[in-house]
Image (cartoon, rainbow, N blue to C red):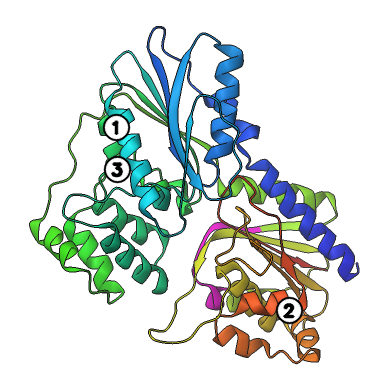
Amino acid sequence: MDDTSQRRVLEDAFAAAVVRCQADESMRGLLPDPPADGRLLILGAGKATARMAEIAETHYRERFPEAAVAGLIAVPDGEPAALEFVELRRAAHPLPDERSVDAAHRMLALAAGATAGDRVVVLLSGGASALLAAPVDGITLDDKRRVTEALFAAGAPIDDLNAVRKFLSAIKGGRLAKACWPAPVTTLAISDVVGDDPAVIGSAPTVPSRILPEDVRSVLARYGIDPPEAVRRRLAAAPAPLDGPWENLDYRIVARPIDALQAAATLAQNRGYRIEILGDDIQGEAGIEAARMAQLCAGNGDRKLALLSGGEVTVTFQRGGQSGYGGPNREFALALAIGLAPVERVAALVADTDGIDGQSGTHGPVAGAIVDGGTVARAAERGLDAQNYLSAHDSGSFFETIGDEVVTGPTRTNVNDFRMILIN
């Protein structure tokens, strides 16, 4: 199989993975019926939530035309949406802005107006943590941003990020569900987290938080982060965990990372590949995990094998050091290309399923990159030293220059990292 055919399989498999995890595929059967007499309130946030809200509106309009539907969702800038009953708010991602705060307070106000005769449907997907930011009393948005930026720079995994976010939030960690009481709440979520834990997805606005001050202190100490004074005061005050009541809560997952891998596996199998799914829970430093995977490829003698994996890798920046631009998937791809050189008949696609891997390129969002055993040599012919670009965390410039970016635009779903390696 030539390089062109390999790349076609990779691109087709990634497309199949994204389609499988669209809300269209599996959400309609999970939507609850509206209440007999009260209102149906649709609330939500995330990169995939605009599409989820469109599906919900269409479902209720077609099946329950008399239902009183209202609500609000928060989505990133540029995300398309066509909504009739649900109010649309746009906010910043991956770090919140004042619009994130406004959206969160507006949502809490709507939730507080719900009665026992109403029903609330909460739509969640990756990105919700930044799009809904309502700091607790005594904490400013700048305080939250400073802590979040430090955790990002330290390469903290999403579990640690969300633990701190929940502790500092007036809407996360079950506080949105508490505001909805006594209305029943059904949450529909597209999972972008390892293990599909409802307590982590979107910082869990409808799942009671069990985060204690000592948990947050441990996270901050692990990454050597000195928090702002207001955060230290809240930690010292040791607030008690959020109390109930917690009945009338229902949680349903619409799509998971493993769904994406299985869809890609089916396509590759139909193209003649033997399949090995390494897991949908791979975490760690992008460069280290890529080097490990390259070694696995070099030692594999199968003639036609597809290795699939998901999860969420991270990138750690040296304090005070210079860096280029890119994202964890492109950094993984660059490190993988270095590890594969000069292995023949191996190609890989590494991308974020939401179509946006970290920082955008010159022409807009980039999902990831395609590499093979000849990537480093081709780059060298153009005067590019792959190792230098990796050391500078400048995978974005590297792949933009050699033209091996994966560009999809926003996919309207998000089940985190997707990696596929073909060995012929």
* Mark positioned earlier in the residue sequence (1 or 2): 1
Element marked by disc 3? loop
Q: Residue at x 27, y 74 (%)?
A: 225
Which residues, given as a range, are shown in magenta?
277-289
Disc 3/disc 1 C-alpha distance (Å): 11 Å
What residue is shown with label 2? 401
Per the picture, the main secondary structure of the magenta-coloured stretch is strand
Considering the image in quadrants, where does the N terminus appear? bottom right
Q: Position of residue 342 (x, y in %)?
A: 77, 85
Closer to viewer: mark 1 or mark 2: 1
Whether residue 41 sits left or right of residue 386 in the image: it is: left
What residue is shown with label 1? 109
**Dot label at residue 156:** none
Whether residue 377 sits left or right of residue 38 in the image: it is: right
Tag 2: amino acid: Thr
Q: Quadrant of residue 306?
A: bottom right
Vertical comparison of 294 with 49: above or below: below
What residue is shown with label 3? 171
